Amino acid sequence: MDHDNQLTADVIVIGFGKGGKTAARVLADAGRSVVLVERSANMYGGTCPNVGCVPSKMLVHYSGERRLEDDAQEFFAKSIAGVRELTTAFRAGNFAAIDGRPTAMVLTGTARFLDEHTVSVGEGDDAVTVTGATILINTGSEAIVPAVPGLAESTRLVSSTELIQNDHLPRRLVVIGGGYLGLEFASIYRHFGAEVTVLESAERLLPREDDDVAAAVTGILAGDGIRIITGATVLDVRDEEAGSIVRYEVDGDSGEVEADALLPATGRRPVIEGLGLEAAGVELTERGGIRVDEHLRTSRPHIFALGDVNGGEQFTYISLDDARIVLDQLLGSGERATTDRVAVPHTLFTTPPLATVGLTERRARTEGRRVRVARENVADIVAMPRAYAMEETRGLMKFIVDSDTDLILGAALLSIDAQELVNTVALAMRHGITATQLRDSIYTHPSSTEAFNEVFDNIVSEA
Ligand SMILES: Cc1cc2nc3c(=O)[nH]c(=O)nc-3n(C[C@H](O)[C@H](O)[C@H](O)COP(=O)(O)OP(=O)(O)OC[C@H]3O[C@@H](n4cnc5c(N)ncnc54)[C@H](O)[C@@H]3O)c2cc1C
Ligand SMILES: NC(=O)c1ccc[n+]([C@@H]2O[C@H](COP(=O)([O-])OP(=O)(O)OC[C@H]3O[C@@H](n4cnc5c(N)ncnc54)[C@H](O)[C@@H]3O)[C@@H](O)[C@H]2O)c1
């Protein structure tokens, strides 16, 4: 690395996301010189530890601890302080994990391509130019604010980041969109004591899940006091002194709901603006992500795109797996590919969480498979006293099994500990462990996994 404002490196990483930082660390340990560029000192480590998974899941935890006698505002402010403390520590740890390595450095500033090997960081006299043989783009995604008249101008519009950094609990939260982010935030803020309304445009929540699973989640959220309005078209937002009035329509009937905070949760789009991708000749897909092949190489083979920015599934562990693929290209045999991915699990962190993997029953039947469906309500699973011991007996477990091969095709686990259970199911699916083998395994007691000893025998349909 040369001059203060002109650097060269083997690898430039743009964005401090999961994939980029993982790759940066391993490449530095392999002796490569690495410059990692991050635009904000508040984002060392990326979205997940600063404003995404970690703070939101810590709030799931805190909100579940609240007792009725706790003062809602005070309890919330203490929880936000706890989140701040953890994210500050994680941020420092993330910075040190890169900048503390002899051949790596973190450069703070916004990166922009000047050409296919050169990136400029920052503006004016302080701008630094970095030239690299290999470049990894890992700039993440940002929330979409839907084009609803009055929404973008509303003073009560909040991003998920602003919401979790503000230590004032909104009295009335309106969430537009009932997907991952919307339902998690609805559940968290309801448990903290806010009045929460979810306006979802689809005819029901979680349209991709089976009807019974979606109905169970909806029942739990509604039972917790969240107002869920599906099939809703949000018409406009009008700020008034006492609150923002959100007007919506369902089947031609209009309604209004008042908000102190308004959270759009209608999806996130790749962050590519201002990156100067044209200067590098990096192409986009029709949907606005960076176009990559199965090895995550862009239209410029020495430039890779990892994580949310490549338009794939937006989960931290996908960004991490992207890093494995890129590292395999740069240091390994080059065989690993996105097409290898099998049985990727997902967890929606409501209380209790919904974890899913593989096919739904509907999808399996649409594909013409002969399936055996096993399902049981958590409250009825005798083999799982942990649910009673932890006082969380809501939910159900459902498995879709291939009738011919006994292989597990999919699962939906709406249960305490589901975020852990699903990983065992996914592992079984990846390695051809049958439903019978999973049923007949020895599990610790009392644990949630013990439910597998029982649920597979609770067959509700077979054909
Ligand atoms: C509230 C919330 C909760 C979530 N919960 C979960 C969860 O529980 N589990 C899960 O798996 N996923 C969760 N996600 C999704 C997950 O956070 C993302 O999929 C993941 O963080 C994406 O990581 P990434 O590697 O793509 O980049 P990111 O972690 O988003 O990092 C990108 C970085 O690039 C920086 N950057 C952008 N442009 C530039 C530029 N031009 N120059 C320099 N730096 C730049 C940004 O500041 C940012 O730090 C959640 C997301 C949100 C918003
Ligand atoms: N636990 C997790 O892993 C986790 C948590 C939060 C976010 N995330 C990631 O972040 C991504 C973004 O989350 P998200 O919830 O914003 O997106 P999402 O795609 O998960 O859900 C968006 C929801 O908004 C609805 N919608 C779209 N436009 C609408 C409109 N105009 N009015 C009302 N409803 C509308 C959609 O039907 C959908 O249900 C997720 O897809 C996920 O990949 C993951």
Image (cartoon, helix red, strand yellow):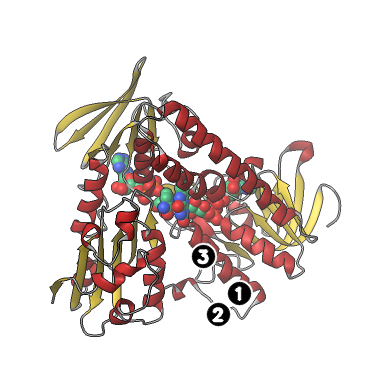
Front position in the image: 393 or 219: 393
**Dot 3 and dot 2 residues touching (CB under 8 Å):** no
Q: Secondary structure at mark 3?
A: loop
Quadrant in which the N terminus is drawn: bottom right
Of the numbered discs 1 and 2, the one sitting upstream in the chain is 1
Between the C-alphas of marks 1 and 3, the distance is: 16 Å
Q: Which kind of residue does numbered mark 2 sit on? A: Glu
Which quarter of the figure has residue 282?
A: bottom right
Q: What residue is shown with label 2?
A: 335
Which one is closest to the eye, mark 1 or mark 3? 1
Residue situated furthest right in the rendering: 3
x and y percent of residue 397 in the render? Answer: 26, 63
Residue at label 3?
292
Report the residue marked by disc 1: 328
Give the residue at x 20% y 28%: 255
- Give the left or right position of residue 341, taking residue 359 as reference: right
Q: Residue at x 43, y 59 (%)?
A: 313
Determine whether, in the image, residue 213 is placed left or right of residue 88: left
Residues at discs 1 and 2 in contact (Cβ within 8 Å): yes
Residue occupying the point 20% across, 47% down: 203
Tell me the SS state at disc 2: loop
Dot 3 beta carbon under 8 Å from ligand 1 = no
Q: How many marks?
A: 3
- How far across and how far down the image is residue 220, in percent? 25, 47
Amino acid type at image mark 1: Asp
Crowd around label 2: few <14 · some 14–19 · many ≥20 (10 Å): few
